[in-house]
Image: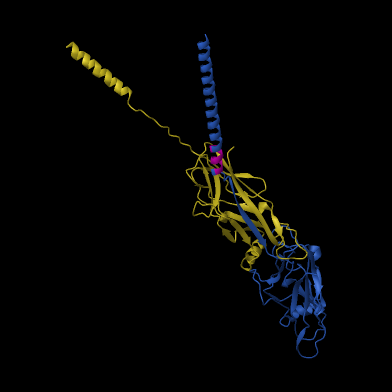
Chain colours: A yellow, B blue
Amino acid sequence: MKRHLLRLAALAALSVAGLGFAQIDAHDVTVRIPSILQVRITNGTSTAASAAPAIEFDYQAAANINTYLNTVNAGGGDLPPTLVTDFGNVLVFSNRVGTWNLGVAALGLTFTNNLGLTPAPTGAGVALADLKVTPTGTQDASVATRSATYTLSTTSAVVATGTRTTGWASVGIGGNDYDLTVNGNEDPGQYVTTVTYTISMP
Amino acid sequence: MKENTHRRLAVGIFQAQKLSNDLGELMYRFLTFILTALLLSFGQAQLSDTHTVRIRIPNYVGLKIIDSAGNITNNAGVTFDYAANPVAYQAAVLGTQVLPPTQVSSFDDIQVVWRRNTNWRVQVRATTLVFTGTGPATGFNLADIRVRRGVFSGKTPGPAVGAPTIAVANVLATWSLSTAWQTVVNENGATRGWESLGFNGRDYEIRVQGDETQGQYTTVVTYRLVSP
């Protein structure tokens, strides 16, 4: 009996020793989520950034002259773009905690006497503030606020705010939401500006 | 004692190596973090996007006579038909010697549009009177037809909305017709779209003295917009 007990004790000791020699291993899992804060202008149907979005108010074109004249003759008013290229929407993407701001600013208008008039007009009568935007597009739920109407300026102004998005989120601002306010005092010629939308977090 | 010293030295070296390794690890992790941050930063760097806006304002000048509906007409006319109203004619001859039109057709306003900040003028002339009747046409001349701006129509120069840019002082108050071009408006600067010159067919009148040969006198009056 005593011998059996000794054998059992030896077996138990070997078992424990065996367990001590079992191969235990581990590995780490590292997850790194990028911080994303982006804005882009798209054609309105895809999320790809447009290469050269543009808005044109070409009221020199023969087909559009009467629209301009009739508008100013009625005391002034707002004219829609005559051509919008690859500017269907403004999208934002943020996975950061906090509120993002979408600001807009424009360069000063550059005037060109493209009609070759003599004496050359100076480009009076058209100002950045004559470009008015009234967003009409679908607004994503992550977009908390959006200006109902804003005009352009060289000073950046916040036109929309929001929180974390789920991928690309629509702000609902498109090229066709732009209007040109005229009252008939505009010098004939061409005026060009570049408008920049910037996303930031305070 | 010596052995003990060696042991302490060994421990010290080991600790220094460990510290060095820890610092290296920290440095490695720090640099990795910076590089990762930079890479992530570059990966999501589109914080702004731009688009262009191009505006083209037309250069356009024009002059038009319009009817009461605002439409350009090709049949504007002013008629002084006193053959059917000899009493009024006689009364005028004996009184003011002035008669208003008996009918004005499609001549509710005359307007111009000028898009530049330069000088422009409106001039008028008429063709020689064509007489239809009996005997020599005497007693009535082109100069007997005159316009008194706004007197009967109540019109004033300038747009209906906003401050007028055609100054009243730059439009003649009265002019008589002639075969030579004469300036009736002399203005500087762009109009605000189509602007009224401040008169229409009802502001025409004829002067009569009673020595006019009976019959019909016809002329065609032309207004033109010019830039010197």
Where is B184 relative to A200, above or below? below
Asked if residue B191 lies in the magenta stretch, the reply is no
Placement of the C terminus of chain A among the 4 image quadrants: top right
Task: Work out whether residue A126 can be spotted.
Answer: no
Q: Residue B84: image x %, image y %?
A: 71, 82
Asked whether A38 or B166 is in front, the reply is A38
Which of the 4 image quadrants contains residue B162? bottom right
Q: Residue A128: image x %, image y %?
A: 67, 52
Q: Residue A115: image x %, image y %?
A: 71, 65
Which of the 4 image quadrants contains residue A184? bottom right
Where is B160 relative to A173, above or below? below
Q: Residue furthest left?
A: A1
Magenta part mainly helix, strand or loop? helix
Instruction: State the residue at coordinates (77%, 68%).
Output: B149
Where is B45 relative to B29, above or below? below
Placement of the N terminus of chain A among the 4 image quadrants: top left
Q: Is residue B138 left or right of residue A167?
A: right
Where is A188 relative to B207, above or below? above
The boundaries of the magenta stretch are B36-42
Asked whether B52 or A72 is in front, the reply is B52
Asked if residue B40 lies in the magenta stretch, the reply is yes
Instruction: State the residue at coordinates (24%, 15%).
Output: A9
Q: Residue A135: image x %, image y %?
A: 56, 51
Asked whether B37 or B25 is in front, the reply is B25
Which of the 4 image quadrants contains residue B103? bottom right
Task: Work out whether residue B138 can be spotted.
Answer: yes
Asked whether B39 or A71 is in front, the reply is B39
